[in-house]
Amino acid sequence: MSKKDFDLNRHTARLLMDEPFFAALSRRVDKVECKELPTAGMRLNDDGFFTMLYNPDYFSGLTDDEMSDVLKHEFYHIIFEHVTGRLPGEKVTKLWNFATDLAINSHLRHLPEGALVPGEAEFEDMPRGLSAEQYHALLQEQMQQEATGGEEGSEGSEGSSLNDIQEFDNHDGWGDSVGAAPQIAKERLKNMVRDAAREASSSGGWGSVPEAIKKDILSRIDGTLDWKKILRYFIKTSQKAQKSSTVKRINRRYPYLHPGRKTSRQARVAISIDQSGSVDDGMLAAFFAELNKLSEIASFTVIPFDTGVSEKDVFVWNKGKRLEHKRVLSGGTCFDAPTAYVNERSFDGHIILTDMYAPKPKASKCQRMWMTTPTNAKNPYFKTQERIVAINYDSGY
């Protein structure tokens, strides 16, 4: 087929034949030809609808497997809420664009040349399976090393610079929508994903969607999902790779010239506990009971706060240790205090246990999740794109 005859809409059903979830989602996203883009891009329109723009000349040169993965890549951008406002701060940057692509491409295996993939080419030292926030933190570290010339003898001092790497797809306009469009899109996306999930479940399979992502999708569309499972999933996915040099492993980029890399994983999770009087003892007891179980897989830094952080009472809850909850403060609530404390330190995830009765805080540098009562989860004091999980502690813990 010639390039001028290529129409992606005519191919999507065939390309996604074995992908029930993505096929269902694809039917709910308009696909519009746009030769101004080199590859593709996902957009949020002013009316709150999503549109995938694509260059027909680019797509006509791809294999079926490559086209399928590019389609899934674009759909993952809306599934992971990259388009509707999930940002590492207040604006989109090149590093954030890289980070979102790396998080998505961890789960795709037939991407065309030019795609940014963890463990390959310029990103060969980055592990697969991290979140966009975690990749963003690693990229910031790499950029800082490049700015200072890198460590003597390290791989960061050679090879391509992050500034030289080209973005794979177009992310223009993310986070720029004004008015009611972002909120409308958020609700519409939830309905789209819910309907696609139901179709996939009724068809007997989710195709290539990894089990962890499937669980995450279901947790976002089903408010009745066990809060304990969500908490465990958040902690497990907050694990950040710790790299060190080792002569026992051959360096793939510079064999026998530089040492290889050894990777271990350990979650550094901050847990901020709202000490205000409106947070009842029942929720605290249920939360601590579950943390006692989770301390088998990770260590936590517990941060008591009300209008400020009680730094003298901050402690590390080491793996395998069992503790009982206790109050050390009893004032009001300010979420900027624990956020600033965590932002100034190296954490991979931040969980805040609270009644949600305080103004919206500053942006978090790591992924952040809120845990509260079912009533407060439905009626938070402020709106946020971040996960709010209801702790149903009346049924036991």
Image (spheres, grey):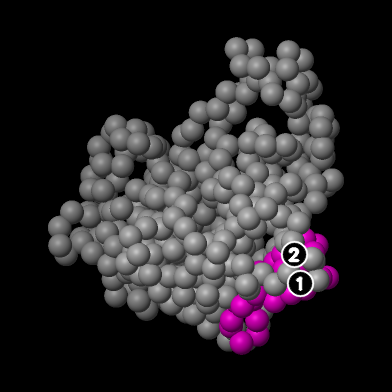
Residue at horizontal 27%, vertical 59%? 226
Residue toward you, 22 or 94: 22
Residue toward you, 359 or 99: 99
Quarter of the image with the C terminus in it: bottom left
Can residue 78 be seen from the camera position used here?
no
Can residue 378 be seen from the camera position used here?
yes
Report which residue position mark 1 lands on: 5
Amino acid under label 2?
Met
- Whether residue 55 appears in magenta in the rendering, the answer is yes
Label pair 2/1, CB-CB below 8 angstroms: yes
- Whether residue 22 appears in magenta in the rendering, the answer is no
The x and y percentages for residue 215 are: 37, 56
The x and y percentages for residue 115 are: 70, 49
Quarter of the image with the N terminus in it: bottom right
Report which residue position mark 2 lands on: 1
Disc 2 and disc 1: Cα gap in Å?
Answer: 7 Å
Residue 393 placement: quadrant:
bottom left
Q: Which residues are magenta?
A: 30-58
Q: Which mark is residue 391?
A: none
Residue 127 placement: quadrant:
top right
Could you say whether the residue bearing mark 2 is in a helix, strand or loop? loop
Could you say whether the residue bearing mark 1 is in a helix, strand or loop? helix
Q: How many marks?
A: 2
Residue furthest front in the image? 1
